[in-house]
Amino acid sequence: MRTPSGGRDGVRADFPIFARTFGGRRLIYLDSGATSQKPQVVIDAQAEHLRSHNANVHRGVYALAQEADAAYDDARRKVAAFVGAQPQTTIFCKNVTEAINLVAYSWGRANIGAGDAVLITQMEHHANLVPWQVLCRERSAELRYLEVDERGELSLQALDRELARGDVKLVAFAHVSNVLGTINPVAEMTARIRAAGAVSLVDGAQAVPQMPVDVQALGADFYGWTGHKALGPTGVGVLHGREQLLERMEPFLTGGDMIASVDFQSVSWNELPYKFEAGTPPIAEAVGLGAAVDYLSALGMERVREHECSLTAYMLRRLAEVPGLRVVGPPEPERRGGLASFTIEGIHPHDIAELADRGGVCIRAGHHCAQPLMRCLGVGATARASVGVYNEASDIDALVDALQAGREVFGL
Amino acid sequence: MDDLYRDYILEHYKRPHNFGELDPHDLEGLEHNPLCGDELGVHIRVKDGRIEDLRFHGHGCAISQASASIASQELKGMQLEDIGKLDADWMIELLGIPVSATRRKCALLNLKVVRGAVTGDNSWPVSSTEAESPRGSAISNVGDEELAEPVDVEREAIGARDTIPTSEHRILKPTGNEEPHGND
């Protein structure tokens, strides 16, 4: 079996975008935390579905419609199995933002009231922050934040203290922080949350693409992630939920497909997971995501994690050579996902990204949709380099070379 | 020489003109660049219908800080009623460097703040017409390795300078008496 690496014998050749050049230079893509590149098998699976199997799902009796049904159901089975979930509690949605909104609306509005609290963390990106802020404002509930310490980590003792106050109904937190890279101790946290009688929601957008995830073992009541960061297409995300909770919840969006029967004045809901999939779903996108998890499974998620961890270790070591560069988040690569957010004294992050681009290196700069966290870190923004299965050490070297050259441009 | 990070841009970034607080002031504004979380505020002192003095404050990238610094020199002495007529081209020409569609928002942030403070209308630039690059889509086809940049005579002329621009680069000529340049 091939190993995840960038070389000619590695997986990079599976990703057609790397055949492109920019200004005569090869593409050096270090922005997988924003979105991943797509392997040929995903592009082909989606195209083949549209070319040969396209029909709407759940409606047709003709052979083509049954093929579309089978393709969509098959994608759901694969995606569920990839993270140890059951198909009937695996809901396709647009992205992780919609997955979180689904819970905030359907579960939140039925279960959060005045005097209750929702607990999130200071490291959440806006997708796992704004829906709770809106919910709490609407329900006169309190939104509280678990602090991030100077290492960029959460404290289980602080979580215990918050839960002991007795008013926390839901705790929502990232599996892996998109800014700090921190891997949170999900199983320890969900056990405490469950013991306190609260519900947990884990945002796995940054975790599922780069490490083995077993939602049963993690013990979260809700676990959401998105397809496009996991080598899949945009437009398809996933929410896994505890069956008893999903059964009791009202639908989020209403319309076709999510109903059992409709009368002039009444309606009854379809069974799981269809109750939460109103309207025509992202069929071709789900098929593409099914191909993506097949691809990742063939590589082996343990090996993907090893690859990203060793590349992150290399990145942290090389970045430390750049004068004035400061990386945020835990210093140990094994405690973080495959990314490094950093600042360079004397160069604004936007300019860092621009200067990296001079060397053909794609990195991101900004607040990474986590403005409250930026305030905690005392920075307006950071630059962020994040790796995927197709990256290799030479990509990190190119980044460091570009940063060193950039310091010279700025006369540092 | 670097196209974007010319010496005078970096000089304005490192030692921006007219930055700080101005108290008392008559007008003020504050804007954020939602892309990067940068913020830029302005204090303006008004006399006889003109900007007598102004100071920017906040943090941002080299492009947004240099734009504010360069614009501050031009804005001093301007009639308030002329501020609303300043457009994106005015700022980009004043800046004198090729600015990509993304960095355009950085370059225009100071003008957005000043227009908001003076006119009370924070909606500028409204949409694609002014905020976006007039030079077409930034998406190139595979094989188009570089974007073709049409030759811009005005830009060439301005871009050729390599020193900090001075008042002769004013485009809208202030008619008032010359005020000292604050903390220049």
Image (cartoon, coloured by chain):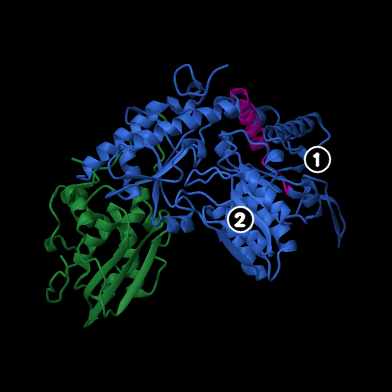
Chain colours: A blue, B green
> From which residue to which does the magenta span run?
A277-299
Of callouts 2 and 1, which one flags the residue occurring earlier in the amino acid sequence? Answer: 1
Q: Is residue A19 above or below residue B141?
A: above
- The quarter holding residue B183 reads bottom left
Residue at horizontal 58 percent and vertical 57 percent from the top: A158
Residue at horizontal 39 percent and vertical 52 percent from the top: A381
- The quarter holding residue A162 reads bottom right
Q: Is residue A340 magenta?
A: no
Q: Is residue A297 magenta?
A: yes
Q: Which mark is residue A159?
A: 2
Can see residue B5?
yes
Dot 2: chain letter: A
Residue type at tag 2: Leu
Q: Position of residue A68 (x, y in %)?
A: 74, 33
Q: Is residue A142 above or below residue A361?
A: below
Q: Which mark is residue A59?
A: 1
Say what secondary structure mark 2 lies in: helix
Q: Is residue A28 or residue A205 the one in the foreground?
A: A205
Q: Position of residue A360 (x, y in %)?
A: 34, 33
Residue type at tag 1: Arg
Camera-near label (2 vs 1) is 2
Residue at horizontal 13 percent and vertical 74 percent from the top: B179
In the shown orientation, is residue A350 left or right of residue B183? right
In the shown orientation, is residue A194 left or right of residue A364? right
Crowd class of label 1 (few under 14; some 14 to 19; many from 20; radius 10 Å): few
